[in-house]
Amino acid sequence: MRRPLFLPTARQTNWLLIVAFLALGEAMYLRYHVMENSTVSLACQGGLATWLCDAFRLVNVLYPYQVFGGVALAAALLHLLRPSIVLATVALAAAALGVVLHNADLSALAAGLLILSLARPALTTV
């Protein structure tokens, strides 16, 4: 049985690029503006009630369990078996979040699997 090929259209490629850049930008903003900035980090730990501090608390809860890397790896494996744009989107966003937010081991493996899912057999001439 042949493995289905994943060849995104131009619109799907643009969608994947937008999701990847937004996830990467949000992860970098959270890490460098909130987590590593002592003033903001201490304010959030002190009980400041903003959406940014809620995101900070959520990342701190999910980080020890490597949720970002695990979700990225699971979605990338499923995408490798059954290619779909939804699984590629979830895997790409979770991998981008995981690489920046210190879940790099599983997230990098997921990114490698996403790249592998784009491998297609060479065209044969008849």
Image (cartoon, rainbow, N blue to C red):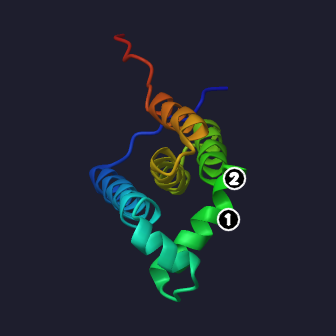
Disc 1 element? helix
- Residue holding disc 2: 64
Q: Residue at x 33, y 49 (%)?
A: 9
The foreground one among 67 and 57 is 57
Q: Residue at x 62, y 63 (%)?
A: 60
Task: Tell me residue 112's x, y (percent).
Answer: 50, 30
- Percent from the top left, x then y, of residue 70? 66, 47
- Disc on res. 40: none
Residue beneath disc 1:
61
Point out the residue furthest to the top here: 126
| Quarter occupied by the C terminus | top left
Pointers 2 and 1 in contact (C-beta within 8 Å): yes
In the image, is residue 104 above or below residue 11?
above
- In the picture as drawn, the residue positioned furthest to the right comes out as 65
Measured in 3D between alpha carbons, the distance from the residue under mark 2 to the one under mark 1, in whole angstroms, is: 7 Å
Could you say whether the residue bearing mark 2 is in a helix, strand or loop?
helix
Q: Position of residue 50 (x, y in %)?
A: 48, 87
Q: Say if 116 sits above or below 57 in the image.
A: above
Question: Residue 22: x, y in percent?
Answer: 35, 62
Kind of residue at disc 2? Pro
- Residue furthest bottom as drawn: 49
